[in-house]
Amino acid sequence: MNKDILKTQWTKNWSGNWGLLFGSLYGEIYTSGIKKLTGKDFPHNLIIFEKGASSNYLIQKELDDYCNHLVSLIKKNNKLTIKWSNQVIKNTDRINALMKKLDQQRKFTTKDYNDLQKYRLEITTANFSIKKVIDYLPPDLLKSKLKRFTKVRLYTESVYNETDRLLYKVVRFLIKNQLTKKLLSVLTCHELEDSFKSNKLPPQQALQKRIKGYAILYDQAGQYETFIGSAYDKLMSSITGQDDKGEIKGTVAYEGRAVGRVKIIMDPAQPGDFKEGDILVTGMTRPEFLSLMKKSAAIITDAGGLLSHAAIVAREMKKPCIIGTEVATKALKNGDKVEVDAEKGIIKLLCHTKNTIGK
C-alpha cells in the first residue's frame, strides 16, 4: 500500500467499545458490500483498536466523493431514499429475530456466526448511506428527508451493541473458550474464519501485543495492512494530531453553552462517578448512554453527523452538543473544566492538569 495515503485528511466515522470481530468486518462493508447498494465504494478505510474500543476512519475526500455520489443518485431517483429506509427497517427486524433465536441457544455452529455477520453487512450498507448523505443534501431535500431518516436511524441504533455481544457469545463457543474475552477482542473476523478451516488461532502472545494499539488499513482490492507498536504510534500521530491551543473544534448538533467537568465515558455500563451537570465526552453515543445524556450539561463526541445518535437525542433534549471533534476523547482528561460553546462549535479548556492536551 502507498504509505503517502496516511498523510491525507482522515475523519472519524464511528467509535464504540466493540472488539475487532465486530470492527474488522467493515473492511468488506465499505468496499464490496456498499458497492452492491450504490455502485460506489471507498478506496481506503482504517479500523483502529485501542483501550478496549474500536474506531473507523475514512479519508475525508473519499467520504465527500461517496456522499456527493449518493446525492446525485437521489436527485435522479427520489424513491431511492424510501427503498434504503425500508431496507434498513426490514434488515433490522431480520437481525433482531436472529439474535433473539441465538440468545435462546446454548450451542452454535459456524452458520450462526456467518448469518450474524451477513445480516450485519446487509443492514449497515443502507444505514451508513442514510446516516452520511443527510449532511450533504441541499436544503429542500434535507427538509423532506430528515424526519424519515431520523426515524430509521433510531429504529436500528440498538442493533450494533447487541451484535457485538452475541458475536462474543457465539465465537467463544466455536473456539471452545481458547481465548479470554480480552484476547478475543483483538481477534479479527478474517483470522477467525481462517481458523474454521485450519483449526488454528493466532498465537496468544501475538494477540496480547495488539491490546495496546492495533490498526488495519483496507483497500478496495480486498488487501489490508496492519500496524502495531511503533508503526501504530506513528500512524495515530499522523491522523489524530492535536495542537496544544487549549480549544477543540467540532460541528454544532444543538446550540447552547455550558461549563462543567469532563467525564470521558467509552462504556456506559461503567460510568464511574458521573454527576449531574458533568460534560459527557465519548467517541459516539448509543441508546445505552441515555441516562448519562440526561444528567449531562452538554455532550461532546469524536464522531458523528446530523443523524448520529448524539445529534438526534441532543435536539430532543435541547442540550448543547458538539459532534465530530475527532480528538475530544484523546485531548481531554477526566476532571478537566471546560466551556462548551455550541454556538460556534468550540470547546475551551478552562482548567486542566499538566500534559492534558496532546497526551
Image (spheres, rainbow, N blue to C red):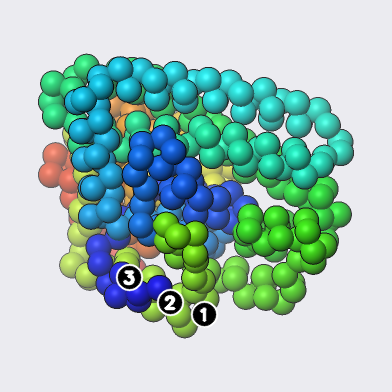
- In the image, taking residue 49 as reference, residue 75 lies left or right, namely left
User: 49 or 127: which is nearer to us?
Assistant: 127
Which of the 4 quarters of the picture holds residue 78? top left
- Cβ–Cβ below 8 Å for labels 1 and 2? yes
Please name the amino acid that badge 1 sits on. Answer: Gly
Residue 184 appears at what percent x and percent y? 70, 58
Element carrying mark 3: helix
Label 2 packing within 10 angstroms: few (<14), some (14-19), many (20+): some
Label 1 – label 3 distance at C-alpha: 17 Å
Element carrying mark 2: helix
Please name the amino acid that badge 2 sits on. Answer: Asp
Q: In this view, does 231 lie above or below 309?
A: below
- Cβ–Cβ below 8 Å for labels 2 and 3? no
Instruction: Give the residue displayed 76% in from the left and 31% down from the top.
Output: 102
Instruction: Give the residue displayed 61% in from the left and 23% down from the top.
Output: 94
Element carrying mark 1: loop
Instruction: Give the residue displayed 44% in from the left and 18% down from the top.
Output: 86
Residue 36 appears at what percent x and percent y? 44, 38
User: 87 or 301: which is nearer to us?
Assistant: 87
> Does the image show residue 293?
no
Q: Label 3: which residue?
A: 6
Please name the amino acid that badge 3 sits on. Answer: Leu
The N terminus, quarter of image? bottom left
Q: Label 2: which residue?
A: 233
Which of the 4 quarters of the picture holds residue 70? top left
Q: Which mark is residue 229?
A: 1
Label 1 – label 2 distance at C-alpha: 6 Å
Label 2 – label 3 distance at C-alpha: 13 Å
- In the image, taking residue 189 as reference, residue 301 lies left or right, namely left
